[in-house]
């Protein structure tokens, strides 16, 4: 039991090291993290429904996962750089496209969910 706990702590430490790396070395991850924090704040400020909050949190997570996966692919391709294969650039471009698509879809989902709340807020401010 004690050994399992030690392994779990070590594994958790490695995961946190990965997050620290992404935050300190990946500008896009920092930008996405900022937007994620803003969306979380809006969830609480606008008091969105639970199911909407879950969807928004899953979308934030999805963007983080795709960005981290993109970073992994970039590092692997960079390791192979001395023997550049014609597909090296294509792999990086495709992974960037994955992140872009996940970010765009997340923004669209966010707009769909937040629109009624912002509309209601505007109407309240406009008529009071």
Image: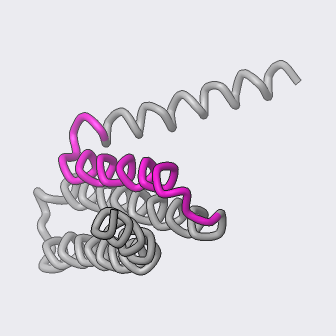
Give the camera-side residue of 119 and 95. 119
Q: Residue at x 12, y 79 (%)?
A: 86
Residue 93, horizontal then vertical, whole percent? 18, 75
Q: Quadrant of residue 90?
A: bottom left
**Residue at point 44%, 60% (across, down):** 60
Q: Nearer the viewer, residue 67 or 81?
A: 67
Q: Is residue 114 left or right of residue 32?
A: right
**Quarter of the figure that contains the N terminus:** top right
Q: Residue furthest right?
A: 1
Using the image, determine if residue 79 lies above or below residue 116: above
Q: Residue furthest front?
A: 128
Query: Is residue 83 part of the magenta span, yes or no?
Result: no
What colouring method underlies this structural image?
A: one colour
Most foreground residue, 33 or 2:
33
Q: Residue at x 51, y 50 (%)?
A: 44
Residue 98 is situated, as x and y percent measured from the top left of the image, at 32, 76
Q: Is residue 62 left or right of residue 70?
A: right
- Left or right of 104? Residue 46 is right
The secondary structure that most of the magenta stretch takes on is helix
The magenta segment: 23-49
Q: Nearer the viewer, residue 102 or 116?
A: 116
Q: Position of residue 102 (x, y in %)?
A: 36, 74
Give x and y (percent) for residue 70: 31, 62
- The quarter of the rendered structure image containing the C terminus is bottom left
Whether the magenta-drawn stretch holds residue 26 is answered as yes
Q: In this rendering, is residue 107 above or below 9? A: below
């Amino acid at each position: 039991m004690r050994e399992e706990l030690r392994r779990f702590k070590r594994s958790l430490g490695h995961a946190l090291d990965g997050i620290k790396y992404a935050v300190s070395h990946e500008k896009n991850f920092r930008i996405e993290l900022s937007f994620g924090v803003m969306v979380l704040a809006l969830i609480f400020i606008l008091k969105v429904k639970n199911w909407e909050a879950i969807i928004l949190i899953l979308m934030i997570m999805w963007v983080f996962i795709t960005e981290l996966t993109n970073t992994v692919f970039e590092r692997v391709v960079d390791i192979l750089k001395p023997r550049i294969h014609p597909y090296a650039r294509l792999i990086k471009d495709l992974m960037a496209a994955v992140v872009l698509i996940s970010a765009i879809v997340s923004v669209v989902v966010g707009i769909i969910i937040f629109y009624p709340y912002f509309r209601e807020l505007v109407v309240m401010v406009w008529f009071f």
